[in-house]
Amino acid sequence: MRSVGLEPLEPYLNSQTPWRCRCTACGAVGTPRLSAVRKLVKEGVSSGCATCNRRARGRRQREANAGKTEAMMREAGYEPLEPNLLAGTPWNCRHAACGEVVRVKASSVRSGYDLCPLCRAVGNKQRGAARRIDPVEATALMRAHGFEPLEPYPGASVGWHCRCTTYGKESKPLYSGVKGRGHRCGHCAGSAPLDPAECAAEMRAAGFEPLEPYRTR
């Protein structure tokens, strides 16, 4: 028992009886069986108490996988610059594509989700430039749908101050909605709130005098 880091705290009875011992590595007190410890010794995986034993097995497993992990990183274009045994811990590596030193996780690279942060930023800029809308084209599309822009193009998902070329009403439609779903002026579509003053004037023109404020259609 002492050879595997366990100090007996009571007399030995037999190999099948739990034996109260203290782990010399962490100080924890447990009751391992001598038969179980002998089995672990034969398998070459015994090291102190059960907790220390699990940690030792995990450490040996990580060390055994370290070579495979480094080979995987190099295949993905990353040259490790320091030892790393934890797949979820950022790892200092040099990225072959850009030559920069970056911190990436082996677990993410293995899953194919974690690119070089610097290359990813460049890629995002390039994709953003490719998706960027030409203000002239955006203005032409809005006019084709009955909107006259009253300000410069603000972006696809920002309200664009425009005037309806049919009713002359002002609103702030989204370019993305007009282009993707063909949104029209709310007054043309009949979905915009009505102006109480205009409603009252329309009633008077028809021979009716409103006796209370306009509420709903």
Image: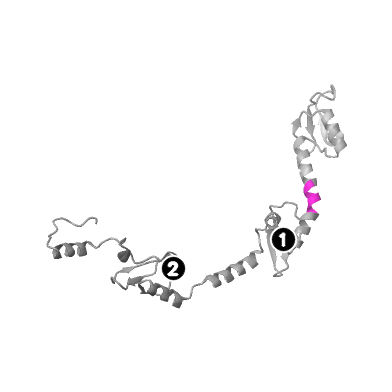
Q: Left or right of 214: which side holds 57?
A: right
Q: Is residue 55 visible?
A: yes
Mark 1 and mark 2 lie on one chain; the one further toward the N terminus is: 1
Residue drawn at x 53%, y 70% as measured from the top left:
131
Residue drawn at x 86%, y 36% as measured from the top left:
41
The location of residue 26, given as percent across then percent down, is 76, 38
Tag 2: amino acid: Lys
Q: Is residue 159 above or below residue 213?
A: below
Tag 1: amino acid: Asn
Q: Secondary structure at mark 2?
A: helix
- Separation of marks 1 and 2 at Cα, in angstroms: 45 Å
Q: Left or right of 156: which side holds 205?
A: left
Residue under numbered circle 1: 92
Q: Which mark, by number, is residue 179?
A: 2
Circle 2 crowding by C-alpha within 10 Å: few under 14, some 14–19, many from 20? some
Residue drawn at x 31%, y 69% as measured from the top left:
170
Q: Is residue 132 above or below residue 48?
A: below
Region in magenta: 61-66
